[in-house]
Amino acid sequence: MGLMPPASTYHHFAVGLDGEKMSSSRPDSTIFLGDEPAKVAKKIRRAFSGGQPTVEEHRRLGGDPDRDVAFQYMAYFFEEDDAVLADLAESYRAGSLLAGEMKQACLDRAEVWLSELAERRDETAHLVEAFLAPDAL
């Protein structure tokens, strides 16, 4: 027909820790790369949960990993192994994994990821300094 094919991209935005839209103007709604480990832990522990209001209900009805921010952060940022994510999601839906345990799993993976990032940042700091030096141009 001589027409250009339609083109579009679809993106799934990561939600903020409160379950709402992520925003840098609300510092408690996201984890920043420079956040101290204690601050990251506090933010993750306060994250919106896809679990039930009580432990008894959660054990009986299970949780919703699609609404659970800790699970979503693991899926988007911290956990690369799809099998691990599938196991966590299944356990959460079944009620055998509680919201606090999901948050702790996220926190454990976030700490590893952020510590590896800090190591790489330290290893390459001299490159950044050289690049930003006035005489580098």
Image (cartoon, rainbow, N blue to C red):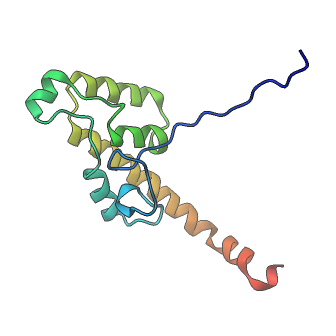
* 64 on left or right of 77: left
Q: Position of residue 67 (x, y in %)?
A: 33, 34
Q: Residue at x 22, y 34 (%)?
A: 51
Most extreme residue toward the left is 56
Comparing 100 with 117, the one in front is: 100
Report the number of numbered marks. Answer: 0
Residue situated in front as seen by the camera: 114 or 61: 61
Query: Quadrant of the image for the C terminus?
Result: bottom right
**Residue at 28%, 39% in the rendered image:** 102
Q: Position of residue 96 (x, y in %)?
A: 20, 26
- Tell which residue pokes out farthest to the bottom in this image: 135
Give the left or right position of residue 108, taking residue 97 as reference: right
Q: Please say if 111 is above or below 9.
A: below
Q: Of 6 and 43, which appears nearest the observer?
A: 6
Residue 30 sits in which quadrant?
bottom left
- Seen at 89% across and 14% down, the residue is 1
Q: 135 and 115: which one is in front?
A: 135
Q: Where residue 24 appears, x then y in whole percent?
A: 46, 61
Give above or below for 55 relative to 111.
above
Residue 70 placed where, x, y %? 34, 42
Q: Residue at x 49, y 37 (%)?
A: 80
